[in-house]
Amino acid sequence: MKFYPLTDTIIDNSVLETEYKSARQIGVVRLGETCLQFKSKLKNYYIPYEEIKRCFRRVMGVNIKMCCGKGELQVENLVLSDGEQDIAVVQLPGQRAAQELMKELKEKMPHADFSAPKRDKETGELVDYKEQAANVAEA
């Protein structure tokens, strides 16, 4: 089995394969001892826990047509970020799986921020929490 890194940290494939087999699986995500692994299409990706600075759920509404009209599905995604940009967005099987995954990630990554980044109401751009705190302190 071949594993592809999503960050600059390279881990030996034999170590990753051993960890993959013993990891806890929630949907397509596997939680190992040292890294989070997930499958996308035909590739297995991994991210060491210490590389993840922010992790949060993003729920996206998907419009669908059904036999009796229109509807909307709520699709759960796990967003992994290195603090500057999103590293990966992983689709999860449902709300229960997302809640369980977030609970376990909080135990494995106490250093990470588990809140979604805020957007400026006027411009729509992402606002850094440090800048936000500085603006509040000035006022």
Image (cartoon, rainbow, N blue to C red):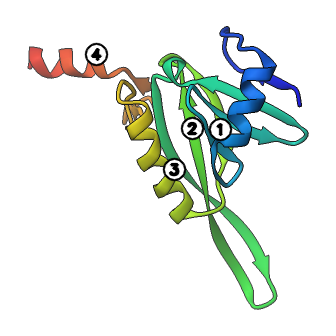
Q: Nearer the viewer, mark 3 or mark 1?
A: 3
Look at the image and tell me whether residue 116 can be seen.
no
- Residue tagged 4: 131
Q: Earlier in the sequence, mark 1 or mark 2?
A: 2
Residue 23, x across and y down, in percent: 64, 42
Residue receiving disc 3: 101
Q: CA distance from mark 4 to mark 3?
A: 30 Å
Position of residue 10 relative to residue 35, above or below, is above
Residue 20, above or below 49: below
On screen, residue 56 versus residue 130, left or right, reads: right
Mark 2 or 3: the one toward you: 3
Q: Quadrant of residue 61?
A: bottom right
- Mark 4 vs mark 1, foreground winner is 1
Is the residue 37 above or below the residue 7 in the image?
below
Quadrant of the drawing holding the C terminus: top left
Mark 3 to mark 1: distance in Å?
14 Å
Instruction: Work out how far the residue at label 4 is from the one at label 2, CA to CA, in angstroms.
Output: 22 Å
Q: Please, is residue 40 above or below residue 9 in the view?
A: below
Provide the residue designation for mark 2. 79
Residue located at (51% from left, 16% from top):
84
Q: Amino acid at mark 2?
A: Val
- Residue where numbered disc 1 is placed: 89
Name the kind of residue labelled 3 in the image: Leu
Pick the front one: 19 or 96: 19
Q: Can the viewer see residue 38?
A: yes
- Callout 1 touching callout 2 (CB < 8 Å): yes
What is the quadrant of residue 129 in the picture?
A: top left
Circle 2 crowding by C-alpha within 10 Å: few under 14, some 14–19, many from 20: some
Task: Say which element carries label 2.
Answer: strand
